[in-house]
Amino acid sequence: MKNNTRITAEQYHPSPIQIRECKCGCGHEFQPNRKDQLYIDKRHYDFDYNQTKRKEKNKNRTATEKQLRLNNRVLEKHYIASVESQKKEPIKCYLDILKAEGFLTKNHTGVSEDGTNKFYLLYDYYYRLFRNTSNQLIIEIYKNKLR
């Protein structure tokens, strides 16, 4: 005699591979097509990669670029304010004022030397540091003329 009991779709999975939870952490369960499939699809894989491995790998780069953008904004602010009143270049101000706004001299995109002068390059501006007669650090701000 034949067994006529039917198996419903919820009870029977056509794949011998067990249902698993997506590795990205979304909490969705899926039926893998291959035994090495860990994610529902490429979008879930990309999300996991960008939020874990890539984010950790680029953590220092992100912090450095953030500081470079801040430095550029601070120089831009002082350059524009001084150019409107002085109408000449270079713009001179005390380094302590810029440091109070978050400016750091250790982050720059490059260094250029012109004789004894050493210029530190940023995206849109470059600057030179020197001490005045009362031994205070002064910064000279120049705008890149390439644009």
Image (tube, rainbow, N blue to C red):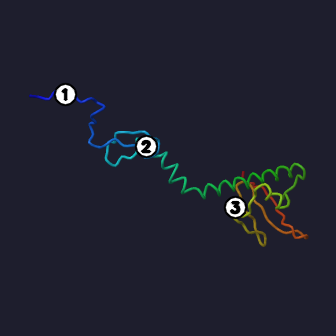
Of residues 4 and 83, which is closer to you in this image?
Answer: 4
Quadrant assignment, res 146: bottom right
| Badge number at residue 108 | 3
Q: Label 1 is placed on what type of residue? A: Thr
Foreground mark, 3 or 2?
2
Which element type, helix, strand or loop, lies under badge 1?
loop
Rendered location of residue 134, percent (x, y):
91, 70
Quadrant assignment, res 128: bottom right
| Badge number at residue 28 | none
Q: Residue at x 87, y 48 (%)?
A: 84
- Mark 3 to mark 2 CA distance (whole Å): 37 Å
Which element type, helix, strand or loop, lies under badge 3?
loop
Residue 50 left/right relative to 14: right
Q: Residue at x 75, y 51 (%)?
A: 73
Tell me the quarter of the image containing the N terminus.
top left
Q: Which residue is mark 2?
A: 42
Compared with 29, 59 (above or below) is below
- Mark 3 to mark 1 CA distance (whole Å): 75 Å
- Mark 1 to mark 2 CA distance (whole Å): 39 Å
In the rendered image, the residue lying farthest to the bottom is 116
Q: Label 2 is placed on what type of residue? A: Lys
Q: Residues within 10 Å of mark 2 (few under 14, many from 20)?
A: few
Of residues 93 and 100, which is closer to you in this image?
Answer: 100
Compared with 123, 24 (above or below) is above
Label total for image: 3
In the rendered image, the residue lying farthest to the left is 1
Q: Which residue is mark 1?
A: 5
